[in-house]
Image (cartoon, coloured by chain):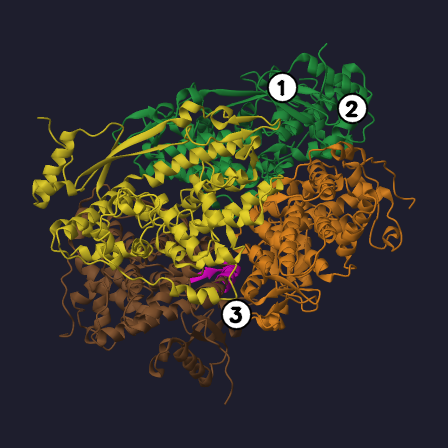
Chain colours: A brown, B yellow, C green, D orange
Amino acid sequence: MANISHLNIPVVHNLVLNRQSTNKRKIINDPVHGFIGVSSGLLFDLISHPFFQRLRRIRQLGLTHLVYPGATHSRFQHALGSMHLMQLAIGVIRSKGHEITDCEEEAALAAILLHDIGHGPFSHTLESSIIPRVPHEQMSVLLIQELNRQFDGSLSLAEEIFSGRYKKKFLHQLVAGQLDMDRMDYLKRDSFYTGVTEGVIGSDRIIKMLNVVDDHLVVEAKGIYSIEKFLIARRLMYWQVYYHKTVVAADCLLTLVLKRARQLVHEGRKLFASPFLQFFLKNDLGINHDVFRPGTDAPAVIINNFVNLDDDDILSAAKVWANHDDEILALLAGWFTGRALFRTEFSHASFPVQKTEYLRQQAGLAFRIPDSLAGYFVVSGEISNYAYKTEDEKIKILYNNGGLTDISEASDMLNVTVLSKTVKKYFLCYPKNIEPFYRDQ
Amino acid sequence: MANISHLNIPVVHNLVLNRQSTNKRKIINDPVHGFIGVSSGLLFDLISHPFFQRLRRIRQLGLTHLVYPGATHSRFQHALGSMHLMQLAIGVIRSKGHEITDCEEEAALAAILLHDIGHGPFSHTLESSIIPRVPHEQMSVLLIQELNRQFDGSLSLAEEIFSGRYKKKFLHQLVAGQLDMDRMDYLKRDSFYTGVTEGVIGSDRIIKMLNVVDDHLVVEAKGIYSIEKFLIARRLMYWQVYYHKTVVAADCLLTLVLKRARQLVHEGRKLFASPFLQFFLKNDLGINHDVFRPGTDAPAVIINNFVNLDDDDILSAAKVWANHDDEILALLAGWFTGRALFRTEFSHASFPVQKTEYLRQQAGLAFRIPDSLAGYFVVSGEISNYAYKTEDEKIKILYNNGGLTDISEASDMLNVTVLSKTVKKYFLCYPKNIEPFYRDQ
Amino acid sequence: MANISHLNIPVVHNLVLNRQSTNKRKIINDPVHGFIGVSSGLLFDLISHPFFQRLRRIRQLGLTHLVYPGATHSRFQHALGSMHLMQLAIGVIRSKGHEITDCEEEAALAAILLHDIGHGPFSHTLESSIIPRVPHEQMSVLLIQELNRQFDGSLSLAEEIFSGRYKKKFLHQLVAGQLDMDRMDYLKRDSFYTGVTEGVIGSDRIIKMLNVVDDHLVVEAKGIYSIEKFLIARRLMYWQVYYHKTVVAADCLLTLVLKRARQLVHEGRKLFASPFLQFFLKNDLGINHDVFRPGTDAPAVIINNFVNLDDDDILSAAKVWANHDDEILALLAGWFTGRALFRTEFSHASFPVQKTEYLRQQAGLAFRIPDSLAGYFVVSGEISNYAYKTEDEKIKILYNNGGLTDISEASDMLNVTVLSKTVKKYFLCYPKNIEPFYRDQ
Amino acid sequence: MANISHLNIPVVHNLVLNRQSTNKRKIINDPVHGFIGVSSGLLFDLISHPFFQRLRRIRQLGLTHLVYPGATHSRFQHALGSMHLMQLAIGVIRSKGHEITDCEEEAALAAILLHDIGHGPFSHTLESSIIPRVPHEQMSVLLIQELNRQFDGSLSLAEEIFSGRYKKKFLHQLVAGQLDMDRMDYLKRDSFYTGVTEGVIGSDRIIKMLNVVDDHLVVEAKGIYSIEKFLIARRLMYWQVYYHKTVVAADCLLTLVLKRARQLVHEGRKLFASPFLQFFLKNDLGINHDVFRPGTDAPAVIINNFVNLDDDDILSAAKVWANHDDEILALLAGWFTGRALFRTEFSHASFPVQKTEYLRQQAGLAFRIPDSLAGYFVVSGEISNYAYKTEDEKIKILYNNGGLTDISEASDMLNVTVLSKTVKKYFLCYPKNIEPFYRDQ
């Protein structure tokens, strides 16, 4: 741990004022769901906690707003919306005769509220260039444990539900499963904010059709068309929004910006950045790092820096870097800030090495940089999506006679072959003013 | 001008890539209006320009999202939406037999697109603590002039319309007037994003009812109820959203944060901040500064710093300041970042000096700071709003017989006394854990 | 009663099947509110009852769909929607610590469900030409009493609440008052179906702000802007929709059609009509008729005919009458069916007798009918509306300190003078191809 | 033709007033699309014509409102909405460089406006029991020809487009094809009015993506997900709304009511009915009737009766029939009017004869009717639907490189096998209080 610079970040005093608040605001306006009620003091305090307030500064869809300008919504809203749907789902399941105690209800609400707490800014970028290979789920567990400590153990049941260790498995499925409240909210919310109305799902109807059989979440038979529609809508959102060519281009560019910044920091060059961003640029906190070994407590310094890092640090720094001495950083950051994005090509097959090489050469010539650095201008990779994962907990349809069938069999239209197919696409990004054509040699 | 530190910010190269783009994207998805078309290459290039792209990083409603979490929309969207409505309005007015040439159309679209270009981050805060007393309209003029220079004079007509110098006055009224496309968009958009559905206005209907008489924008008689509704909705949005107690509290807090930061910079203390924010903290660029004298060209350095400053610089800095040595800055910035906001009281009369004094003393005791600095914890001020300004260009109603009447006379309900009344409220903000009661001496 | 022809209408057997139904459908899709739940067997049985099912065949807005084609919604939907809002309101009021027992809840839901049960087809027309001067409220009481009899007294409490005799007055105010659930639903629903978006009210927000003080419904202070908006929206709907010129024209025409039909029946002429419509055309059931004397049981025959009469009888008959031998009836009914409506003039003063006379003469000439019958072609009358009735139960605003103020004082904008003003307009309707100009003699 | 009773229905005089109207109302409010403009005098006159006004009295979804109470919308609205979308589509196609003359535009608008003009009340019922086996398309052609005659040939081009004889085939495809404006409107409108939000389609986006290649309508590649969604949404609406169990039950019941009424009329029994309904009950106007032989002019009497028949005649008569002497008619009509609907069973295989027989016996016993008439109480049949008809004009996807691919190949998910599969279901309807179980013999 010696290589981690210590910062003393007193996050706790922020809480003082809120905790004393007697008039706890209980209703929140949400353009997607209407009014969202906060049903307990614990939930109110969680929402007021700086760890959670920080989600206000992390856009739910990262750079997607560069294509769909409306999509500026935050993870904060999404977490509240998911909690709201969880409340509805619990009401429905209870009304069908399944017991959920008040404690379980509060814990399930807390678990869904915190399900994305470990998301950093621009998650995918962060996961590859800031805390390499540490998935956000792992950070969520760290933060929930820390919160549980601060809240004197009141979150133990929530943590059990979150991690799937609690005996009533269906509560976990509501938090993380093929029909969880996370998806119900994000599909609806992302459709709403992007204006891609085809992504709208009938979350209200699906929730009304939920039931529990043998401790598993199931959907009643008359909800089958809604489920088909939900699977198709999700897929549409993936290809039309989340993996939109220009979004991929922007993600690549930001990844390159941070990769270059990181490289410069490691070379000892000076760089403008908030101390929180400095911390992650300087340290190498990959998944193999000691702190992620099971049984190890993450040092406070990692958590403190993490919970202070958000979109603003990165965007603010990138803007300054557009004037950095390092020409590569300056170019990349300038393009990023001014939205002069890469061209993206998609293909069902991987791109030939010659093409990539050729483009790197062209980039080298165009921007007068040595071959060894031309990789900063041409990136390839792959993206994939499936409608329905047959290996996961399946979506079961419950018939009036009590029979259960997997959705892939119950559906007239979406048979298992179609549903379980993973669609994979290869992408290639490079500056728009480079000539993409090359001759075979 | 000697005291202005020079920074060389090459914003121009960002443009290179976009300008070369041949496949100009012409349709933008907007959750409020559906699809927004970009009707000319000039408009496309304006939208692609870094000055305009920067509006993506400035929230339309500043800190309002702290109360209405959905309200994260940017000035970028609002400008596009206003342009869209302008296009509709031009179509309606043309269809009623009034000539608007293609040049005038493009210029009017450019003018509305740029109407808010001079907005900085958290405008009100900025106007009081960053560029004191320089209204954003003044900055808009500076930036439009600079853009016109960069676009080789293609924006001259747009500038004339914007500043009201063009002969067809009604075009200016569509950009800035009591029924301008700015208001039509922002009321609808702000309602949409906050979820305050009562603020929704029938902008489509009002636009259908627009007409021109003697070069003035008028509304046909059957639009009268829509206008009443529009005036009431605007008023509702003011008191329920823009001047919501908690929004006022957040604005006050941020103003104090920046005031303290500015003070420390002037005392020579070191402070984390992006160079752009540093520039404005260090320099005193009030309205009386040389650069705002008519006929003077604003030095490039001011413009360059201004167009690089946005919400991110301020939010990112505030987060770092929460750990500053200066206890006042640390407290204020910590509260701000963690959303531990002030309590706000509203009153129709100004608050007695004794109350303010008492609260300052209490704050001094609570936070152990000298009396002279207690002003950083207790702020008072006033806010006001009117439904309809009788001194301004009036809203005229056009009857079938050709007669024109002022809305304040035409309306059965909203007579002039009611309409023109300015409602003023006094506010007082102070930390929540201070005892607000005091005894008369 | 001798002049009332007896019909034996066995409505009861319809019920048999439904009552046996064990799987009572509990959730109804509503485009305005989403899902509407039916919370008890009694409510389910009421909804299934033919008296209530008949509301499916009565359009909420009568002939308004001739102007706003979307407005085809039925009183059935409106009654369900009002019940839904009542459920929400009861939940809110309970959550604020006021007791509402389960019995009271069911009774209040039944009362609002049945609040419009006494509406006949095209109410205004019916009230003037079918059952002259018997307001629908009186018919509602008759029918609720009959239902109570059929349901063995289970509706006694509902009837007490409906008629304002129950001790908890606020329950009656929720059914019929200046802020009742009837208005909350109809304003929202009528806006939705007409497409007049400005009429949309924030019923959800208003309901969240309801409270009870001294057994009276009040609104918490932060709902004040929503109330202002509600009053304005209601007024807008009146003048823009309910009293739209063309709607007034259509209402006049239908009134004349029925007046002529009635006249012919009384003259002994034969006329196509369903037996139910025949009954009302033949008998003179005005308010002074014996059956409406207090203490008298309405004979089953009146009820049986009334609950079988709906829009279809009238529209179907009018279509046939377009070919009647009587030229006046044929003309009027033909125009009505083909939507060849009258021209309508509005005025703030009553129309001069000479003008009306002149138009009648012109009509006589144009359609070759004797002077004595020309009144069938020219009608005048008046309509009026007020935003807020000061003589009624007032809308009280509840402040945080417990103080109560009338909305007309609490509102900055809508003072009592403005609010309580009754706006009255005179109208004059006549065929479009008559020359409306006349010379003074 | 001797057996057709002659009625003289002077529909023409209705027109007089409207045709003289100088102030033609040009904008119609529509809750689904906002404002719908009427772009020419011919279109205005068509809309004002009694043939078209009659569509106001025919519900778009027949009896569906018995399940989804909001679905009371009329064919009138749907026709206007389709015309509106046609206008948008023509704008899009023109903007992509394809010529559509003003005449062609008006004709295409007229063609879509009239595409459903031949629909009678409760089409499916009508087609089986009123004008047996005459599809509404055939009636539409008859009526368009008659209108063309009345409009002195102004509709000749519209008729050519409607019937697919016009040289520009894509115009016909916009009227009737797998992506026609009819479907675009009805899916959106039916979703809106039923409240089944999952049926919402992105018609705006699909229309933006339309193009024409080799005189065929195609969809640009980036619209592919919207098309998938459209196909799925259409399928969902079929099974969740149009073929909802209770809707099938209601349709069956109404069919039986009319079948019995027809039988009684043929037996010479007297029956209340409007002359228009009498006409169709009395005459046997099946597809083999002389009047439908090609080259034969339909006698005016058929047209005159047809255009005067609507939902009201049938509903009003059914209500009266509930008291008819014939017990079977009285029972069926009473159930229908009081919404005491049949139970419906669905099955993927046809129902065994024994089961049907058993149920008929039970019905005979329960309602004390002879075996020979028990068929009036138990009905079976089948319904089917396919997502995409491969034999029809295909939906072609247009790639950037100019290539065209069938949607069933272009889609990653919806392969041809899945898409072209016809889903068929068998249904069985019988009174709810009959015991559905039987023993094998």
Look at the numbered disc 2 and give the secondary structure of its residue: helix
Chain letter for the residue marked with disc 3 in the picture: A
Alpha carbons under labels 3 and 2: distance apart: 66 Å
Which tag is nearer the camera, tag 3 or tag 1?
1
Percent across and percent down for residue B173 are: 48, 38
| Residue bearing the label numbered 3 | A409
Report whether C438 appears left or right of C395.
Answer: right
| Residue bearing the label numbered 2 | C328
Given residues C438 and A391, the one toward you in this image is C438
Q: Residues within 10 Å of mark 3 (few under 14, many from 20)?
A: few
- Earlier-in-chain disc, 2 versus 1: 2
Name the amino acid type tagged 3.
Answer: Glu
Any magenta on residue A356?
Answer: no
Report whether C363 appears left or right of C289.
Answer: right
Alpha carbons under labels 3 and 1: distance apart: 66 Å
Instruction: Determine if marks 3 and 1 fall on one subunit.
Output: no
Residue drawn 31% across and 45% down? B292
Name the amino acid type tagged 2.
Answer: Ile
Given residues A281 and C101, the one toward you in this image is A281
Instruction: Determine if marks 2 and 1 fall on one subunit.
Output: yes
Picture layout, residue C14 above or below residue D385: above
Residue drawn 47% across and 75% down? A425
User: Quadrant where the C terminus of chain B lies?
Assistant: top left
Which tag is nearer the camera, tag 2 or tag 1?
1
Which span is picked out in magenta? A218-232
Q: Residues within 10 Å of mark 2 (few under 14, many from 20)?
A: many
Percent across and percent down for residue C60 are: 58, 34
Alpha carbons under labels 2 and 1: distance apart: 21 Å
| Residue bearing the label numbered 1 | C381
Given residues D318 and C357, the one toward you in this image is C357
Name the amino acid type tagged 1.
Answer: Gly
Residue C157 seen by the camera: yes
